[in-house]
Each structure stands twice: as C-alpha cells, then as structure tokens.
Amino acid sequence: MRVFSGIQPSGNLHLGNYLGAIVNFVKLQNTKQCIYCVVDLHSITVWQDPENLKRNIHEITAGFIASGLDPSKSIIFNQSSVQEHAELSWLLNCVARVGWLNRMTQFKEKAGKNKEKMSVGLYTYPILMAADILAYKATHVPVGDDQKQHIELARDIAQKFNIDFHDRILEITNEEEFFVLPEPQITGPVTRVMSLRDGQKKMSSSELSDMTRINLLDNADQISNKIKKAKTDSAPIPEKMSEINNRYELMNLLSIYAGIVGQSHEEVLNVFSGKQFSYLKDNLTELLVQNICPIGNEMKKIINEKEYLEKTLKEGAEKARVIAIPVLAETKKIIGLA
C-alpha cells in the first residue's frame, strides 16, 4: 500500500487543510509508505505573486512538519522539483478524453461565467493530478470529498492506458496491467470544513476575507475574534442531528469541534444540545487555541529555518524520483517513445 496526497501552496494554511487532510496524513505515516507533496505546479493554474510563492511552499512544508509529519517516515517534497510529474502529465493528456474533463465540476465552480478567461492549466489540472498519483503507482489517495471526482478521473486514465497498451504492457512487464487504479480515502476527521461566514461554501485560502477561515498561524486573539464573529442563527442547539436540517453554520461549528476532539457529531451534540451558540463558540475557541496555536507557534519557528526546509524538500525530491523515474521510463517504453 502506497499513499500519495498533496496540498497547494496558495498561502494561509488553514483549519480545513488540517482537519480535512493533514491529521490523516500523520496517522497514515506510521503504517504505510507515504508521499506528501507541496503541489506548486497546481498553484500556478491561477496567478501567483512570484515573491510569495517560495514562501508559501516553505509555509506548507513547515505546516506539515509542525503538525507531526516526520521527514524520516514520509517523503515530503515540492512537485516542481520532480520533473517526472510534468512529463507524465503530457503523456496522460494524450490518453484522457475531452469529455472527461468537461464533466469536472470543480472547474465549473471555480471558473463560473468566466471560463473563457481561465487558464488552460486550470482546465487540465486534474490530469496533472492523475500524473502526481500514477507516477508513484499510489494505491490510496487521502483527499477531501470535493476531490473524489478527480481520483475517479485518475482511475479512468489508468484503466484506459492499461487497456490501450495491454499487449505492450504484457510483453514488457509480464503483467496484465501497468498502472494501479488508486482508491480515494475520504477519512479525515472532517472531510470538508466550511467557511465561517457561509456554511455552504468550503473554507478556502483564496477567499478575500480572512474572517472566513482559521489559519494555522493565527494567534489566540485572532481565533477568538473569528469564532465570535462566525455566522450563526438565534435558535438554540437541538438534541438530535435530524433537527439541524439546513442550519449549515451550526453543522460546521459542530463538525470542527468533533474533528478536533475526535468524537462523533452525536457525541458533541449531547454536550451542547439546548444551549445557545455563544456557549458552543466559547468552548470551541478554547479548544482551537489549545490545539492550533501550538502548531502555529512551531510553524513560525520552522519557517525561519530556510536551510532546513530546503534540505528537507531536496532530500524528499531525491527519494520521490527514485520511485517516479522508472515508472516514467517504463511508461515511455510501453508507448513506444523509448
């Protein structure tokens, strides 16, 4: 079993990244071979300030380590330092079908009415994501539920390659299939953390208002202020999950609390049922300060250790290439390019 996943260095590593992905990354590294990537090539599908991009790469790496990822247990590197990702992506572009990409809902959501003005990279980035995974023949990909469709695309691409080149694969590798069909692992404590200002929108680093998210670098006062001003309603907290219905902001705060303490929604609801939002907010603030601030403080220390971060990424890239180079070489041989 080989695990692969990644996070974009778009700045403002936040609670959604932590609960939706990083907590699970840390657990998996103790039992599986894990490869975790700062997907910087994905980040440039929309314009990035060149001065900030390098710092953001370091921030994500520092966040990984501060949260508990161990570079001696997990391979940690930035995507652009392993050229096999980009080259395999082009080969897979020639396997994937336009109709498959047209079904990708995330592009439609991000582009909205401006799809003609979006970069080609934003449209084709699910194929690069497939290359990220298939370059390591990863068997499992821990992701949030919004990325499940992209894993399904990676499986479609892998399967089509295996069918299109079946005879060559058998001849060269003596195997029936070349690429493994990866399985999505949607098992984080909270598969999708929502905005503090809109319980129907995903928490995101791209939102202009910093009040929509809890950043891992936020201090206690910032966390307190954001939770205090998080959108709520006036009704008391109900006794049963079935009674929450469309109270999206309540559901989000309960989910965050449950994710931090490692309990079910029902268990958390038993604690807060019948109480007002203010009681939940006070308790959630205290919990976040206790759990997130130490990570943020450690991140701030590691971010300043630039030589250590560069060494970690360089060594991770070298380890990653040991796996990716032969996979790409065999892919080209199967296609007839080598």
Image (cartoon, rainbow, N blue to C red):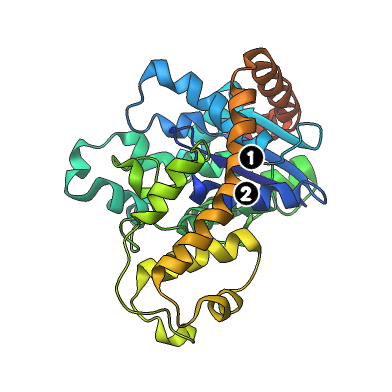
Mark 1 neighbour class, 10 Å CA radius: few under 14, some 14 to 19, many 20 or more: some
Residue 309 x, y percent position in the rendering:
65, 20
Q: Which residue is mark 1?
A: 294
Q: Which numbered circle lies on residue 291?
A: 2
From the viewer's side, name the closer residue of 187 and 318: 187
Q: Say which mark, if any, is on residue 32.
A: none
Q: Is residue 20 left or right of residue 104?
A: right
Q: Quadrant of residue 140?
A: bottom right
Secondary structure of the residue carrying numbered label 1: helix
Marker count (numbered): 2
Which secondary structure, mark 2? helix
Q: Are marks 1 and 2 in contact (CB under 8 Å)?
A: yes
In the rendered image, is residue 186 in sight? no
Q: Position of residue 123 (x, y in %)?
A: 34, 42
Instruction: Tell me residue 46's x, y (percent).
Output: 33, 32
Rendered residue at 43%/33% (across/down): 10
In this image, 118 relative to 318: left or right? left
Name which residue type carries label 2: Asn
Choose top left, top right, bottom left or bottom right for residue 136: top right
Give the camera-side residue of 185 and 19.
19
Q: Nearer the viewer, residue 156 or 247?
A: 247
Q: Amino acid at mark 1?
A: Pro
Residue at (58, 41) in percent of width and height: 293
Q: In this orientation, does residue 83 appear?
A: yes
Residue 27 to residue 320: above or below = below
Q: Residue at x 55, y 52 (%)?
A: 288
Mark 2 Cα within 10 Å, few/some/many (few <14, many 20+)? some
Residue shown at the point (71%, 47%) measured from the top left: 26
Residue 13 locus on image (x, y percent): 49, 38
Q: Quadrant of the C terminus?
A: top right
